[in-house]
Image (cartoon, helix red, strand yellow):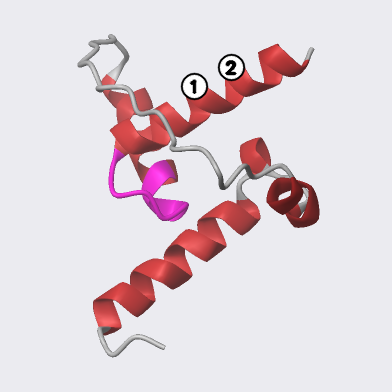
């Protein structure tokens, strides 16, 4: 247990966000079984991208992101886009 109340709250928010996130639902046992801990994960440098949307849409998406424990719209959008790509690769 963390003595840092902000970290504890953040951890709880992340658990709730992923538990309720319909895009990323998965069986935990399958996830653990698929982990390959013997390889170093490759990381890719992030690149800034601009998209255009209505202010109403931006506000609603930002609120939805915060509701699900994300710090902002960008990290939420990245997760959504990745989930779409992951789903596409399964098909």
Q: Residue at 79% across / 47% down in the picture?
A: 30
Residue 6 in the figure: left or right of residue 41:
left
Task: Measuring from the top left, give residue 26's x and y in whole percent.
Answer: 74, 45
Q: Residue at 51% across / 29% down in the picture?
A: 80
Does 64 appear above or below 44? below
Does 52 appear above or below 25? above
Front residue of 72/28: it is 28
The single residue placed furthest to the front in the displayed view is 38
Task: Measuring from the top left, give residue 91's x and y in whole percent.
Answer: 79, 12
Q: Residue at 32% across / 13% down in the picture?
A: 53
Indicate the secondary structure of the residue bearing disc 1. helix
Task: Tell me if residue 43 is in the magenta stretch.
Answer: no
Circle 2 Cα neighbour tier, 10 Å, few/some/many (<14 / 14–19 / ≥20): few
Q: Name the image quarter holding residue 24.
A: top right
- How far, Cα to Cα, is label 1 from label 2? 6 Å
Residue 19 in the figure: left or right of residue 48:
right
Task: Measuring from the top left, give residue 89's x and y in whole percent.
Answer: 69, 13
Front residue of 13/32: it is 32
Of the numbered discs in the image, which one, if any, rests on residue 85? 2
Front residue of 45/86: it is 45
Q: Which residue is mark 1?
A: 81
| Mark 1 touches mark 2? (CB < 8 Å) | yes
Q: Residue at 64% across / 45% down in the picture?
A: 35
Task: Measuring from the top left, give residue 38's x and y in whole percent.
Answer: 55, 44
Task: Tell me if residue 69 is in the magenta stretch.
Answer: yes
Does 63 appear above or below 18? above
Secondary structure, magenta segment, majority class = loop
Q: In the rendered view of the protein, which quadrant contains the N terminus?
A: bottom left
Q: Give the number of marks.
A: 2
Circle 1 Cα neighbour tier, 10 Å, few/some/many (<14 / 14–19 / ≥20): few
Q: Name the image quarter holding residue 55.
A: top left
Q: Which residues are magenta?
A: 65-72
């Amino acid at each position: 247990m963390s003595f840092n109340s902000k970290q504890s709250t953040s951890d709880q928010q992340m658990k709730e966000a992923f538990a309720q996130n319909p895009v990323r639902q998965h069986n935990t046992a399958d996830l653990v079984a698929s982990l390959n801990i013997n390889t170093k994960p490759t990381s890719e440098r992030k690149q800034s991208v601009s998209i255009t949307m209505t202010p109403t849409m931006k506000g609603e998406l930002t609120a939805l992101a915060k509701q699900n424990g994300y710090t902002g719209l960008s990290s939420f959008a990245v997760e959504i886009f990745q989930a779409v790509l992951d789903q596409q690769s399964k098909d």
